[in-house]
Image (spheres, rainbow, N blue to C red):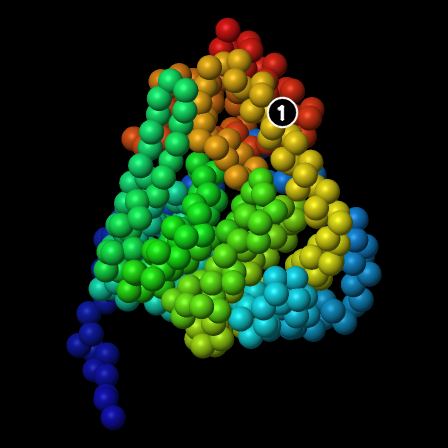
C-alpha cells in the first residue's frame, strides 16, 4: 500500500494554463482541416454525392419506433453487417461497422501504432492519414506520386517500391483523394506481398470507377492475405455523409482485435437503419452513380475550354491543374458562394479539386469560371 503525503505534494503550476494537461504532441500538431461548410453555398468541395439518398432510407428512418431510440443500438450493427456480407460477398465475421470510415481508420491506428511505429502512404493523399499518425505520435513517411504534367496529359502513378519500406501501416486511397487515380489490382497485390505490416486500401470512391469490374474493388484480397484491410463508406455514392457509416473488411482475427478498440456502441440506431435501407436499394444506388458519372463527364467537357489538365479520375471529382492562379480562382468562386477545394501546400498549390454536382450546380460553376478566367 502507498500512503500519500499530501502536505509535501506541491500544487501544480497554473502558469501554462489548461494546455499543460494536454500531451505535448497534441499541442504541437496541426488539426485536420475539413472542407468548408457555408450555409446556402454551392458545395463542390467535399465530394458529397449531389443526389439525395434513396427514398427507402427516409421511409425506414420515419418508421423507427420509440424503443429503438430508448435502447442501445446493436453494438456490432449485426443487421447491417449481414446485409453487407451478402452484398460484398464475404462473411459477417470479416466486417466491422464504423462511425464513418474515419472511425475505422482511427480504430486501425489505435490498434496497431505504438510510439516506435511508422506509417507510410503515397502523397499527396487524404490528409487524415497524417492527422491520425500525429495523434498516435508516430512517424509518417510520404512516398511522392510520380506525376507527369505535359502539354497533353496529366498522370499520377504510385511508386511500387512503397511496399519495400519497413512500417506498421501502409495506407493507399484507391481511387486516390485528391487525384482520383486508380491503381491496378496487380500493383496493389505486389505492394501487399512485399509489405511487412498492414496494408489499408481505402476504397471510399470505388463505386464511381468507370468500369463495372473496377467497382468490385479489392475486398476479395482479404481472403488471400492476412495483412489486408479494405475500407468502404456510405458517405459518397450512397449519399449518407451526414449519417456517418463506414465498413472495414479484413480477416476475422484482425476484426476481433479491432472490436476490442472500437467504442461499444459506435454507430447509432438511425444511421444503422439508414445504411441498411440504402444498401438494400441497389437499383437506386446504381442510378445515382450513373448520374454522377454523367455529371462529371459533362463537367470535364466544359472545363477543357479553360486549357486545364487533370489526371484521369475514377472518383466523383476532378483535380485540375490550373497554375499559379489557383488560389485566386478558389477565392473568387467563394465570393460568389461556390465552394471548391484548394490547399495551400507545396504539392497542391497550383491545383483545385472540383466535385461533380447537379446540372444546375455545374452550370453555375462554369458560368462563374467564364467570368473569372476570361
Is residue 59 in view from this perspective? yes
Residue 352 higher or lower than 4, as above or below: above
Residue at 20% in and 78% down: 7
Q: Quadrant of residue 338?
A: top right
Is residue 345 in view from this perspective? no
Residue 193 higher or lower than 256, as above or below: above
Q: Quadrant of the N terminus?
A: bottom left
Please state the horizontal and vertical placement of residue 284, each as a whole percent of the image.
75, 47
Residue at 19% in and 70% down: 10
- In the image: residue 112, left or right of residue 243: left
Q: Which residue is mark 1?
A: 298
Front-lying residue, 149 or 341: 149
Residue at 59% in and 24% down: 299
Front-lying residue, 229 or 329: 229
Please state the horizontal and vertical placement of residue 8, each as a whole percent of the image.
17, 77
Front-lying residue, 189 or 371: 189
Which residue sits furthest top? 374
- In the image: residue 349, left or right of residue 212: left
Which residue sits furthest bottom? 1
Please state the horizontal and vertical placement of residue 137, each as a whole percent of the image.
28, 58
Q: State the count of labels.
A: 1
Q: Quadrant of residue 145?
A: top left
Residue at 69% in and 73% down: 71
- In the image: residue 26, left or right of residue 310: left
Q: Secondary structure at mark 1?
A: helix
Front-lying residue, 200 or 32: 200
Label 1: few (<14), some (14–19) or many (≥20) C-alpha neighbours in 10 Å: some
- In the image: residue 141, left or right of residue 35: left
Please state the horizontal and vertical placement of residue 247, each as a whole percent of the image.
55, 61
Amino acid at each position: 500500500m502507498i500512503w500519500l503525503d499530501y502536505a509535501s505534494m506541491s500544487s501544480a503550476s497554473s502558469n501554462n494554463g489548461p494546455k499543460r494537461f494536454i500531451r505535448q504532441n497534441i499541442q504541437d500538431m496541426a488539426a485536420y482541416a475539413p472542407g468548408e461548410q457555408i450555409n446556402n453555398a454551392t458545395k463542390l468541395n467535399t465530394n458529397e454525392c449531389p443526389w439525395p439518398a434513396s427514398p427507402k432510407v427516409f421511409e425506414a428512418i420515419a418508421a423507427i419506433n420509440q424503443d429503438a431510440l430508448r435502447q442501445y443500438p446493436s453494438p456490432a450493427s449485426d443487421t447491417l453487417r449481414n446485409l453487407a456480407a451478402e452484398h460484398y460477398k464475404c462473411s459477417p465475421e470479416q466486417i466491422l461497422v464504423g462511425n464513418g470510415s474515419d472511425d475505422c481508420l482511427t480504430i486501425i491506428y489505435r490498434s496497431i501504432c505504438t510510439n516506435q511505429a511508422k506509417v507510410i502512404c503515397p502523397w499527396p493523399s487524404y490528409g487524415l492519414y497524417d492527422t491520425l499518425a500525429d495523434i498516435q505520435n508516430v512517424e509518417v513517411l510520404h512516398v511522392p506520386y510520380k506525376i507527369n504534367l505535359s502539354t497533353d496529359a496529366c498522370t499520377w502513378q504510385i511508386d511500387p517500391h512503397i511496399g519495400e519500406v519497413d512500417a506498421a501501416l501502409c495506407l493507399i486511397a484507391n481511387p486516390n483523394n485528391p487525384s482520383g487515380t486508380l491503381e491496378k489490382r496487380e500493383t496493389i497485390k505486389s505492394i501487399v506481398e512485399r509489405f511487412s505490416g498492414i496494408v489499408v486500401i481505402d476504397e471510399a470512391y470505388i463505386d464511381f470507377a468507370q468500369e463495372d469490374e473496377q467497382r468490385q474493388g479489392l475486398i476479395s484480397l482479404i481472403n488471400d492475405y492476412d495483412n489486408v484491410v479494405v475500407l468502404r463508406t456510405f458517405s459518397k455514392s450512397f449519399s449518407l455523409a451526414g449519417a456517418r457509416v463506414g465498413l472495414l473488411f479484413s480477416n476475422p482475427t484482425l476484426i476481433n482485435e479491432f472490436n476490442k478498440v472500437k467504442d461499444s456502441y459506435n454507430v447509432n440506431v438511425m444511421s444503422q437503419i439508414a445504411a441498411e435501407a440504402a444498401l438494400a436499394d441497389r437499383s437506386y444506388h446504381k442510378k445515382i452513380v450513373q448520374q454522377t458519372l454523367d455529371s462529371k463527364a459533362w463537367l470535364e467537357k466544359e472545363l477543357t475550354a479553360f486549357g486545364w489538365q487533370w489526371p484521369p479520375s475514377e472518383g466523383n471529382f476532378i483535380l485540375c491543374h490550373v497554375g499559379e492562379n489557383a488560389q485566386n480562382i478558389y477565392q473568387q468562386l467563394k465570393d460568389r458562394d461556390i465552394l471548391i477545394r484548394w490547399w495551400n501546400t507545396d504539392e497542391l498549390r497550383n491545383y483545385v479539386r472540383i466535385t461533380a454536382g447537379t446540372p444546375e450546380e455545374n452550370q453555375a460553376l462554369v458560368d462563374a469560371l467564364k467570368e473569372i478566367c476570361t
